[in-house]
């Protein structure tokens, strides 16, 4: 993110603080100094701060900044879809202060040189904290492991992934797991039937199990990769799980929850059954049946899922017309979770914020997800009563490929701070300062 200046203290007063890391849901004031949380108390006098900016947050929720473990910022390679700057603005508008980028760029995030340049650019251009997953295999080609130990030494690399492609060859995947264990970082496999994977299998490469029909093998890849990770002493976080049987496979391989997974709003809220035959919007993994969606949603409510990721995947309209997969999600995920999972399904607010902040920070070893004194002053202020309509033309993202256009939501981030510095403010929020 851009380097913060030496700004005055920030004092947020009268908010309802939601901090899952501390189990706190209560009225609190927060004082930030030199980019970190200096004090939390039921009431903090403005005289305790040094030239503070005072925010009247009565009626608002104060959250640890959200953490998205799965985004695509298309940089380098596709700046017309999203840049580090535009993606970061979209994140901030959605209440996110930290994102983790996938490696499917051009060139892919598969070498130390690309990682270093991306980190330099993020510091110059991004208003939120940007981390990356480096590719598991060289050039993200799935044929041999990348130099994971060298890549893992860079401070912005927090995991390894080949993004939308599984590593079909189990011998290569085992080598990846051994190298990731040496690097001390988790793998984050995409256990989906990608075109590359289907082609390799059709040409005779065995994934180590008997494949079923295309786009049904998610749980099989997960079971295989979990077994290899356990054998190698490697941590694993499985990306965008879309089938309930995948959760069964993870639980069977990791009864003590050493392995984790994420789900996306679209796999929780949408299903192919609500669209005419062949008209479901395209995403990978694909939208599932209503029964599978509902089972996944129940699993999340009952605590069997570690975190929620947007899988923010920007595309141009021409790309989508040509069949590109994926949706943008940074600016809608919080509203969708609050509207549908909290208000309708009874997911507790503490648990919702844990799924979107505390848990992903913990899984990827980030200094985030908590507002305890001493932690970075990365915070989001949310208006729980703000009713708003999803209008892609108003997004900060350069892309507009959302399946939720026109949907009415309740609950919205109105201000976001990174290291105590304002990086987003809703126009209606200005009257509170």
Image (spheres, rainbow, N blue to C red):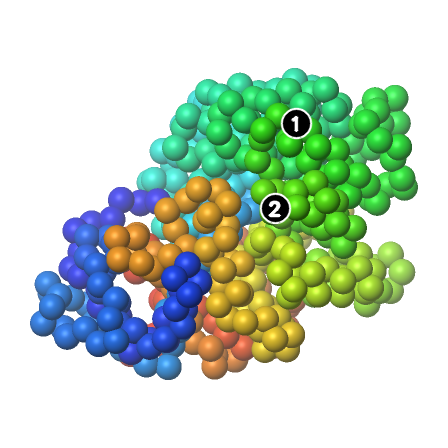
- Crowding near pointer 1: few (<14 within 10 Å), some, many (20+)? few
| On-image quarter of the C terminus | bottom left
Helix, strand or loop status at disc 2: loop
In this orientation, does residue 201 appear?
yes
Residue 196 vs residue 78: left or right?
right
Query: Where is residue 252 shown, x and y percent of the image?
Result: 72, 44
Residue at 50 percent of width and 45 percent of height:
363
Residue 204 vs residue 353: left or right?
right
Closer to the camera in the image, 204 or 199: 204
Q: Eyeballing the image, is 270 above or below 249?
A: below
Helix, strand or loop status at disc 1: helix
> Badge 2 is on which residue?
256
Residue at 68 percent of width and 25 percent of height:
173
Query: Where is residue 214 shown, x and y percent of the image?
Result: 86, 41
- Crowding near pointer 2: few (<14 within 10 Å), some, many (20+)? few
Residue 19 vs residue 337: left or right?
left
| On-image quarter of the N terminus | top left
> Badge 1 is on which residue?
231
Closer to the camera in the image, 421 or 297: 297
Of mark 2 and mark 1, the one earlier in the sequence is 1
Residue at 70 percent of width and 40 percent of height:
253
């Amino acid at each position: 993110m851009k380097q913060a200046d030496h700004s005055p203290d920030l004092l947020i007063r009268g908010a309802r603080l939601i901090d899952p890391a501390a189990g706190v849901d209560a009225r609190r004031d927060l004082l930030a100094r030199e980019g970190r949380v200096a004090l939390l108390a039921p009431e903090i006098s403005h005289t305790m701060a040094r030239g503070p900016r005072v925010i009247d947050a009565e009626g608002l929720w104060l959250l640890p900044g959200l953490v998205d473990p799965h985004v695509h910022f298309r940089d380098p390679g596709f700046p017309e879809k999203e840049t580090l700057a535009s993606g970061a603005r979209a994140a901030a508008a959605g209440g996110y202060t930290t994102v983790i980028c996938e490696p499917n760029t051009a060139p892919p995030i598969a070498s130390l040189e690309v990682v270093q340049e991306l980190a330099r650019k993020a510091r110059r251009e991004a208003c939120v904290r940007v981390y990356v997953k480096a590719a598991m295999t060289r050039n993200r080609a799935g044929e041999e492991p990348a130099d994971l130990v060298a890549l893992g030494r860079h401070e912005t690399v927090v995991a390894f992934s080949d993004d939308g492609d599984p590593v079909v060859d189990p011998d290569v995947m085992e080598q990846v797991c051994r190298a990731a264990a040496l690097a001390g970082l988790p793998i984050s496999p995409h256990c989906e039937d990608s075109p590359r994977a289907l082609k390799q299998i059709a040409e005779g490469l065995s994934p180590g199990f008997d494949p079923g029909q295309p786009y049904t093998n998610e749980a099989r890849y997960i079971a295989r990769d979990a077994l290899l990770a356990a054998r190698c002493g490697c941590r694993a976080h499985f990306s965008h799980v879309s089938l309930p049987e995948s959760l069964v496979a993870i639980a069977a391989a990791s009864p003590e929850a050493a392995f984790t997974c994420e789900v996306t709003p679209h796999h929780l809220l949408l299903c192919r059954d609500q669209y005419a035959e062949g008209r479901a919007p395209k995403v990978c993994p694909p939208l599932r049946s209503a029964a599978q969606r509902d089972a996944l949603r129940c699993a999340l409510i009952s605590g069997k899922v570690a975190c929620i990721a947007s899988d923010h995947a920007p595309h141009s309209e021409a790309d989508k017309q040509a069949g590109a997969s994926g949706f943008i999600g940074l600016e809608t995920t919080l509203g969708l979770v609050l509207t549908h999972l909290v208000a309708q399904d009874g997911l507790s607010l503490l648990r919702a914020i844990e799924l979107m902040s505390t848990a992903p920070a913990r899984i990827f070893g980030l200094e985030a997800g908590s507002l305890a004194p001493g932690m970075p002053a990365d915070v989001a202020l949310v208006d729980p009563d703000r009713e708003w309509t999803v209008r892609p033309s108003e997004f900060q993202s350069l892309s507009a490929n959302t399946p939720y256009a026109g949907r009415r939501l309740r609950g919205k981030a109105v201000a976001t701070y990174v290291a105590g510095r304002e990086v987003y403010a809703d126009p209606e929020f200005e009257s509170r300062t």
